[in-house]
Image: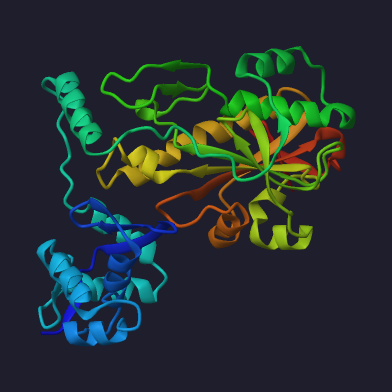
Amino acid sequence: MKLRAVAGLRIRNRSSNHWEMTDLKTRRVWKVDHKTAAVALLYIGEDALAGAEAAEILSSVMQRKSVQKRIDALLNLELLEAADRESALLETNARWASRGWGDAFDYLLATWDYPFENYAAGGQARDEERMERYESESPDNVRYLPAKGELRHQIATVREGLERHIARAEVSEADLLDATLDIASAVTQPVEWRASRTGGADHMLRVSPSGGARHPAEVYLIALNVPGLDRGVYHVSVGDAALAWVGEAPSNEDLQKNMPGAYRLDAEPRVIFVVTLHVARNMYRYREPRTFRTIFLDAGHMGGLIEALCDSRGMTAHGHHGFNDTFVGELLKCGDLTKEVPAYLVSVALEDDCSGASIKVGESVLNS
């Protein structure tokens, strides 16, 4: 009998002998060795295989009985199915993937039949019961992403950053670096930590709000012309209270082509803040399909805070969604939808940089 993988099977390598198989439809995850991953990978794609064919392909690295044993285990877990079985999901998956919507299909499948909870009656108890169940299945310990590179510049605590920013006169070129670092600290660093009621790591509270204190937003700086700060891309690492070096910044021409929203300022941007969203961090608690919309509220709050802090001290800032998602995702090393998605940018310059031929929308200065 020829077999194929079910539509929701995804396989990822986590280390040299640690692979993860995820069934998006049932939202179950298995840790497997490289041999099991190799067998499962044979069945992902358009071609169906019989057990003997799979054993032949892997004969140079695995005994046939070992291959068959793993095939039987995958069948018992319902991760493989008969190839002649009708599957509307597989057809939809292939159609969406052909249009570049593979990640969107994964999100749809993982959330499609997830129940919308009614918290009207006994909401607190229902919420705690639900979170305790999630915690029993897997730990809730991710509050921020690890630094993506070498640590370059320490940043202050949120209170120190805000106090210095408030006391600062209008920002000039001489103190642009200090002002930028203080804004980064005020936006990203925790005001305090509170113990979780249902297990897992303590919850971070920031200046900007976030549903359930999930705070799925990460912040990056693309430094273009900040004296004392090497031109390049930096991750604002919450855990290290520092800027971590991600990589070189592209040319201004490439940035303007792929991030046109950042260039609506009446000046060349000195620095571009980019807010990304760590989807899985929010979905640990909020697993309904609508979650993908609500996380953008976090990005909006954080972007608005960056703009307000800049505009209050002689800097000009403008938030925008205008960018090439793939370009920015690769620039920031975001990975796929299960990791991070770029959501919002705020370009910043000094008011002295502006030509004056501009219009104002709220507190933001835009090109006329």
Q: Position of residue 258 (x, y in %)?
A: 65, 61
Tell me which corner region of the image, top left, top right, bottom left or bottom right, holds residue 291: top left
Using residue 2 as the reference point, say whether residue 202 is left or right of it.
right
Q: Position of residue 92 (x, y in %)?
A: 25, 72
Q: What residue lies at 27% left-to-right and 66% top-to-bottom?
A: 36
Tell me which corner region of the image, top left, top right, bottom left or bottom right, holds residue 181: top right
Tag count: 0
- Of residue 218 and residue 354, the one placed in the foreground of this image is 218
Structure colour scheme: rainbow
**Res. 49 visible in picture:** yes
- Of residue 81 and residue 340, the one placed in the foreground of this image is 81
- Of residue 131 and residue 257, the one placed in the foreground of this image is 131
Using residue 121 as the reference point, say whether residue 269 is left or right of it.
right
Residue farthest to the right, as pictured: 174
Q: What residue lies at 60% left-to-right and 35% top-to-bottom?
A: 237
Q: What residue lies at 17% left-to-right and 75% top-to-bottom?
A: 68
Q: Position of residue 54 (x, y in %)?
A: 24, 82
Q: Does residue 39 sit above or below 221 in this rendering? A: below
- Of residue 154 and residue 353, the one placed in the foreground of this image is 154
Q: Does residue 255 sit above or below 200 in this rendering? A: below
Using residue 323 as the reference point, say whether residue 293 is left or right of it.
left
Q: Position of residue 17 (x, y in %)?
A: 39, 58
Q: What residue lies at 31% left-to-right and 55% top-to-bottom?
A: 107
Using residue 292 as the reference point, say whether residue 189 is left or right of it.
right
Image quadrant holding the N terminus, namely: bottom left
**Res. 311 visible in picture:** no
